[in-house]
Amino acid sequence: MTKSFFYQISSFAIALIILTGMILLSGASPLAIIASMWGGAFGTLDQVARVVSTLAPLLLCASGLLFTFTAGLYNLGIEGQISFGAIVAMIPIRLFQDVLPPALVIVLAIGLGGVGGALWGLLAGALNVYGRVNEIFAGLGLNFVADGLALYLIFGPWKKEGVASMSGTETFHESLWLPTLANTDISPISLLLGIAAVVITLVVLRGTHFGLQLRAVGQNLRASYVLGIPSTRQLLSAFAICGSFAGLAGSLQVLAVYHRLIPSVSSNLGFLALLVAMLIGLNALLILPVAFFFSALNVGSLQLPLELNLESSLAGVIQGMLVLFALLGRGLSETLPPQAIRRQIAIWFDKKQTAKG
Amino acid sequence: MEFNRFGQIHRTAAKVVKLSYRFWQIAALAMLMGSCSSSPTTTGSPQASTSDNPAGGDAWTVGMIIVGPKNDAGWNQAHYEGMETVVKTVPGVKFEYVDKVNPGDRPNVTGAQVADDLIAKGAKMIIFNSDDFKDDALAAAKKHPDISIIHISGDYAWKEGKNFKDQKNLSNIMARMEYGKMMAGCAAALGTKTGKIGYLGPLINDETRRYASSAYLGAKYCWENYRKKNPKDLTFKVTWIGFWFNIPGKTLDPTKVADDYYNGGFDVVMSGIDTPEAATQAKKAADAGKDVRFVHYDFKEGCTLAPGICLGVPYYNWSLPYRKAVEEARSGKIPNEFVWLAPDWKDINNPETSILGFLPGKALGENTKFMDEFIKGLGDGSIHPFKGPLNFQDGTPFLKAGETATDQQIWYLPQLLAGMEGPSK
């Protein structure tokens, strides 16, 4: 058993024990919760479809975040990058929905969504690199700005005829909706884009010179700079790539899910993707299974209020705990070797024995 | 020397920055957990569950998708309790629901998806309780043609309406609450001492313009005819918060809007939103010695929030149309109609026959007699507030002298009326 594996497994076990304790304390049954969330995620075709359709933006965002994490950046602005991508994707839809062929409008919307997200990411990057603003603050600040912009548009210039409403802008024409499978929420195009993002991420981060440079920048910015790696360019590229993936996810939220711009168009999926990215470390191979798991948790959680009278935000607590303990396990594995822990346990046992004797 | 010192400071600063960077990583993580694990809610209610009817077994299930918290002492609670009453009075009916279905409380969940889940659990009828669900209701109706879909306050099933969609299993139900709002406005006019009435509005649409304007017409009538005062001395101001209830960061905070009214010389605030901020803030202001009153909305028990300063409450009695729809759908006929019910003028507070009622509050005092007179007049048609001459807010004519408004003119009221303050669009 390798060192880090030992810590990962133990931290996972501890997280499960604590979660079980919390659930029992709140008067619910952990087994009932697992059963109802499982049923909520895979009980009907509609629900499976929803898991898959939530998976697509998660794959895109988590892939993007691997670039920024590799470069040593915490891109908390991902929510804003999704929202801004969604906003920009609305522009060709509003301008050309009655003018150009639907397929062309869809392609334009997806493309511009990606560009919009990239710009929003670059803005955070520029604030970070040139303005010396910590990227966490830059990102969170820009999240508020993007959110505010969406609200302004929904209640202002883009409001429905005679109605300004939190339910969003007017639904656009059905010919512009991304096609879905068999009357469910699955959009094959979204899913393909999500999977393509994972593949691109795997290839670029593992197999290219750019990926190597990004890793160097992430591990030691100063040293990589001294060694002649154009670190500024790499940092900004990481922001732009992450932003463009997030922007794509935003355009898909508009084209495949809501068919309009709504106030919380990012649906917290960017934050969920951050949890995915933190949990998997820098291992892009794990994006798909972990994102699928989180997507199922997210979708299944709707059953908690329906069946068990529990807050559906419990799913968020579960996700948060898993990530927190995974990080803790990883952190400990870097500082304390397992032997040290075993020694500690042995000493503790010895003391107990002598106390009894 | 100076340069050296500067360099030292710079190095120390760099160290601090490095340390704090680590801190912020952790802080960011904590923040992330917070944002993922909690959603803004105004109440700590359990959100949904099932009401089993003793009949059990072959229960006929009704699913409801509720936009806000089911215990909001307003719109949502009125729907929830209306359906509960149906469960108690009609044997063999089971009630399942999910509340707080809105993008703020439940991100990544749409009304149509909740409908899918409720139908998967056996629901034969789905009720969407907010105007904001109109697209979800239509999508659900298209996807499940054998299920009765009822959308409250929409107009897609209205053949004579502007937005008719030919969808056989979709119905709309609404009360002619403009009458209730006129009564509410009258109560506000009878109760104000400063002549300044504030209206706490939700978002701006046909329905809310209709209600705010009806409230104003009722207030103007009673101000002129019972208080014997000049309409020019009556201030009627509407502030729209942006949604049916507070969503932190996305709407104006109704608590603050209500406070601003009470602190700004408006001694009566009328609620047009789903939640009771007009009442709770009035109570606070009254406890602090201010001479203020409120008019509640939606929920029959509304005045109990602060009985001494309540002028009255127009309320919905949803059990009446719900029972009818359930019985119709159960007999095999899928309802497909636009139902816009007036109160039972013989007794507007009869729960068996009237979809809407008005309960006068204690604060009306001896003015209650005027209230009764006004309601009687509305009922027998001797008082008709939607009768010309009436102008829109921008001065353009709405109704010529003697002309009465049609249903379409009332439902799709395009502007607030002349004499009202506040935006129309």
Image (cartoon, coloured by chain):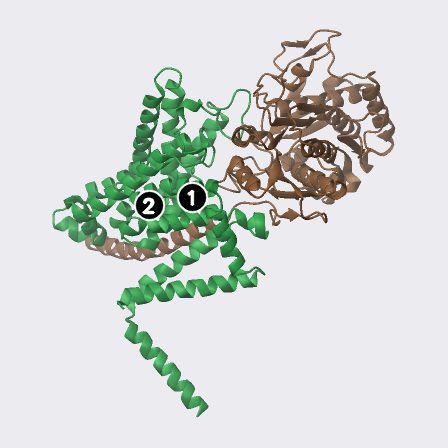
The residue sitting at 27% across, 68% down in the picture is A1
Q: Quadrant of residue B385?
A: top right
Horizontal and vertical percent position of residue B326: 69, 34
Horizontal and vertical percent position of residue B41: 57, 45
- Amino acid type for the residue under numbered disc 1: Val
Q: Is residue B252 visible?
A: yes
Q: Quadrant of the C terminus of chain B?
A: top right
Residue B410, disc: none
Nearest the viewer among B157 and B146 is B146
- Amino acid type for the residue under numbered disc 2: Ala
**Chain painted green:** A
Q: Are marks 2 and 1 on the same chain?
A: yes
Q: Quadrant of residue B176?
A: top right
Nearest the viewer among B43 and B417 is B43
**Chain painted brown:** B
Residue of label 1: A51
Q: Is residue B85 left or right of residue A317?
A: right
Q: Chain of mark 2?
A: A
Secondary-structure class at tag 1: helix
Name the outermost residue toward the left.
A228
Residue of label 2: A62
Q: Quadrant of the N terminus of chain B?
A: bottom left
The answer for how far apart the CA atoms under marks 2 and 1 are is 16 Å
